[in-house]
Amino acid sequence: MPDSRANLGQWQVPQSADLPAGFIEQVSAHLPPASRRYASMVAQLLWRRGIGPGQVSPFLDLTQYTPTSPFAFGEAMTQACHRLAQARDRRERVALWGDFDADGITATAVLWEGLKAVFPSEQLTYVIPNRLTQSHGLNREGIGTLAEAGYSLIVTCDTGSTHTVEICYAKTLGLDIVVTDHHTLPTAGQPEGEPVALINPRSLPADHPLAHLSGVAVAYKLIEALYEHLELPDQPEALLDLVAIGLIADLVELRGDCRYLAQRGLIQLQKQQRPGLKHLIKQCRRSGDRPADISYGLGPRINAVSRIHGDASFCVELLTTLDEKRAAYLAQQAELANQRRRSLQQRMLLEVEARLSDLDDTTGMIVLSSPQWSVGILGLVAGQVAHRYGRPTLLLQTPVIDSQAEGAAGMGLARGSARSVGGLDLYTVVQQHAHLLHQFGGHPYALGLTLPPENIPLLRAALNRQVRVTPVERPAPTADGLVTVQDMGHDLFQALKPLEPFGMGHPIPRLLLTDVWFSQVRSSRQTDLQGKHIDYPHLTCQICDQSCPDGRPAIWWGHRKPDLPEGCCHAVVELDFDSTRKDYRQRIISVAPANADANQGHQPVASTPGVASGEVPIRPAANAPETVWQQLVGVAKYLCRTEEAVEIDKLAERLSLSRPVLNLGLETLTKIGIAVEQPQPDWLQMRQAKQKAPLSDQQAALYRFLMSAWEVQFQHGYGREASRLNNAAHGQALDDVIEVP
């Protein structure tokens, strides 16, 4: 394994720290003998993540950890147990009110199964809001329905903390509410809206071992406390597989009891005693013994149901039914929903990116809307766009309104999801413009909102101004170690495995491979259970270097063969085990040419969609010629719109083009209908022309530009496949890159 370096351009490998005496030996004791040569790297990783000498054993060995009593929540937990015991004694009907994401679904399933030891099934029910037609949390209509049906107690799962108005309404109907949640705490001043008990880890100190519990873990702690309070002989450990799924899928910080519960839950999950989970694991072609089986397999499939169908209530049945045939059918429905989600997500991402050619340095925040976009996918794509372009992103679905209809103006609300980048507190930014919104909620890095469609332009302008003047910390992305391809196998995998499970604050280690090349590259498209193609590409390849010329297998989700540069590269990867092929595989996160311009630094050509790989520049060094063309078109559109002039040398520098190649690009612009003028010798202005050249002339001009740009890059080691451009001159590929404003 090579020595780590302090800096490799944009991706950094931190300098090795001076570790306390004996620290490496402590770490090494928890590794298999064959993996102990990596003990120093693992020790450095743990040290950087705040794990000191006295914490190694309880962190890596769950048998050394002492779990925290559920009654550490104090009076709130005691009150909740008393109220549930009272409901049992009075034979009251109890409703569970969950949420439609994986954490909320598993929390509901935990309470549903856990309370069956206390209440007969006929006294219990559960409610899951519809993602597409309702919002998170309690609502008056659902509360009224439960009251009419004779329910007198509601226990929330992963929701309810700030719903003081709805809790007050429930009281007027004679319903008590116990809240189990981990989201924002309510503000003071509304005592009439207080629940019977509010069990929320945010009420605890930040360093408390229960402080980072997710919704499902809070629900489990309630069951744990209730069984102890009622002195039941039952033990709730059988619920821990559900707890692990919710914890890992919800991306909470896996420290303290969070980590302990996830570790124990993964052991329970390996037993695969639940028919629904067994069939779901089979559908996603995983073994069920890895945290990645949840984060890349089970979690997305549970979440996909509400994203596609809105109603995710059958997911609770999927997780709790004992009927094998029913479980197989429901698992298949979840798989179909996930396949549909992938296709919609990829299609929407391409549509968003097609609209981003106007993106320039004046854009502080990306705000786009369309009536065609699915509400359930908005947040996923917003996250991808934010990471790929390094800008906070808000995507909105606007209502479809018949403009001829009487009173159409103002009908319906736009619904949106936003994602942040760097250290930007997006919640605070949006909060300052709350007067434009109908409602909003979330946290500093992700939020949802609704607003009248006519307010979107005002919000876009306000957020752009706000973000441009808001200082944002954008730390360089950090790799956890510098390794060779030969290292990426069994011994290193076993050295990293004791660190599992990974999550917020303790992410999957990212490893930097230098001076690699790629072979056996294949682009693939998936098919769904009905044999239809899924519009979600990925490529497979072998990553090779001097230590392993034959290479090791890798996969790059969301990418095609042309996205891999030719020649020598650097790559950032995650090491995983492919249970279907029984082999170790690398998930590619980022790739860049190894000999990129030193002034530009080591900048990724592209990053995996939806993976937080650090800020990806809008204009990376040594971009593909097609990408440079798209950037030139974006500049041209901006100049046409603003009627501003630009200095020729600065434009060439911005696009990393020589003057002769830029001139060919300007000539191509004139062919596609943009007039290029020089008001002064060294300045350009552009305007929309009335006519365009024939398509064959456009293609010929573009081909000359692309080939010239490719030739310059080739001389610097940046080249791609010349044959691909040559083929494009005679047909189809140029149609994909010609941009007509």
Image: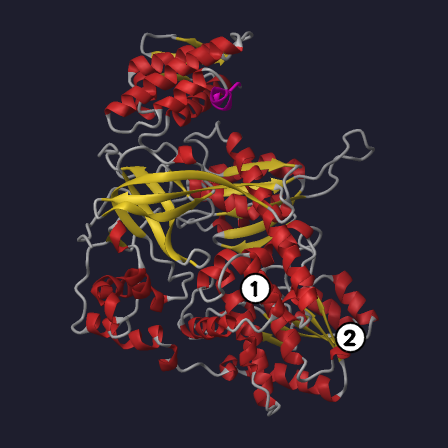
Label 1 environment density (alpha carbons within 10 Å; few <14, some 14–19, many ≥20):
many
**Callout 2–callout 1 Cβ contact below 8 Å:** no
Labels in figure, total: 2
Q: Which mark is residue 151?
A: 2
Q: CA distance from mark 2 to mark 1?
A: 24 Å
> Residue at point 60% right, 69% down?
107
| Dot 2 amino acid type | Tyr
Q: Which residues are magenta?
A: 732-740
> Residue at point 38% right, 47% down?
554
In this rendering, is residue 417 above or below 77? Answer: above
Q: Nearer the viewer, residue 30 or 388?
A: 30
Query: Residue 502 at x, y = what percent?
Result: 40, 63
Q: Nearer the viewer, residue 674 or 474?
A: 674
Query: Residue 44 at x, y = what percent?
Result: 24, 63
Query: Residue 71 at x, y = what percent?
Result: 52, 84
Dot 1 lies on which element?
helix
- The N terminus is located in which quarter? bottom left
Q: Nearer the viewer, residue 231 or 493?
A: 493
Query: Residue 185 at x, y = what percent?
Result: 55, 66
In this rendering, is residue 632 above or below 207? Answer: above
Instruction: Reply yes or no: does residue 468 show up in magenta.
Output: no
Residue behind mark 1: 103
Residue 166 lies left or right of residue 76; in this view the side is right
Dot 2 lies on which element?
strand
Q: Which mark is residue 569?
A: none
Whether residue 614 is visible here, answered yes or no, is: no
Whether residue 134 is visible here, answered yes or no, is: yes
| Dot 1 amino acid type | Asp
